[in-house]
Image (cartoon, rainbow, N blue to C red):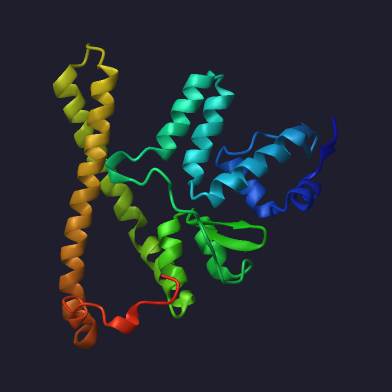
Amino acid sequence: MIEYRLNELARISGVSTRNIRAYRERGLLDPPRRQGRSAFYNAYHLAQLDTINQLLRRGFSSAHIAEFFASMRAGADLADILGLQRSLFAAEGGRDENPPVARAVDIDADGEEAAQLVAYGLAEVIDGKVVFLDASIAEIVGRASDPMLYIRAIVRIVASTRRDVDTLAGVVADALQECIEARFGPDRTPDPLEMHRMVQDYRELANRLVARHLDEALDAQVSSRCGGDAAGALTRPAPPHAVREGS
């Protein structure tokens, strides 16, 4: 079987060495064969990279892709794998069954902002272009008059809130654990269907509560800090010329 070193794999696949290393760290790409300090990849790794790129272009996150490959490595049968695929496309919580396609943004793929987006797990560099993993974010940034201003705001928001978001997620997880113990008891095996519903319910409750309170807080903060036209834009309808061509 033909084997490739990291630089060769990057050249043939069109995926940067930085992204290949990131895929390995996140569990998307199988480990290479090691001989001493050298790492060797083969055609299977090449196929994995192609699959990863296709899924990223369709808007799937690294976490979804890692789960898919983990199921295959664990020997999941075809029904399990298809079930996982259906869950990725499912319209739970009002999601569209056909997820939006991720789009590239017009910024320097080797720049500091691109590196920060990749480090935060918000984007990947594919074929020399920066592609947001969340197609909705890509759409918002893409319609901005100056996308770089939006990207810098995204980086600032994520950097400032990561710790608080992790803390909030811990609070929700603790509340869910208390609910599970109260419902099933310490020695009783939970019903899988009910357990699944409870986890999904708590996830949806947390998302809705946080979104609602964030909207209310944003209204108050924009009114007090920005004032003027920005505060007025909270209540006024968008002017006709605000609709962009192609939207």
Image position of 232 with respect to 80: above or below: below
58 relative position to 173: left or right: right
Task: Assign the N terminus to one quadrant of the image.
Answer: top right
37 relative position to 199: left or right: right
**In the image, what residue occupies the spot 43% across and 32% down?**
86
66 relative position to 179: left or right: right
**In the image, what residue occupies the spot 24% across and 42% down?**
204
Question: Residue placed farthest to the bottom in the image?
Answer: 228
**In the image, what residue occupies the spot 69% across and 52% down?**
15
Residue 151 percent across, percent down from the top left: 45, 70
Q: Nearer the viewer, residue 88 or 6?
A: 88
Question: Residue placed farthest to the right in the image?
Answer: 2
Image position of 72 with respect to 64: above or below: above
Count of all numbered marks drawn on residues in the image: 0
**In the image, what residue occupies the spot 50% across and 56% down?**
102
Q: Nearer the viewer, residue 136 or 25?
A: 136
Q: Nearer the viewer, residue 50 or 86?
A: 86
Residue 12 percent across, percent down from the top left: 78, 49
Residue 160 percent across, percent down from the top left: 35, 63
Residue 163 percent across, percent down from the top left: 34, 54
Task: Assign the C terminus to one quadrant of the image.
Answer: bottom left
Image position of 140 with respect to 234: above or below: above
Q: Nearer the viewer, residue 156 or 82?
A: 82
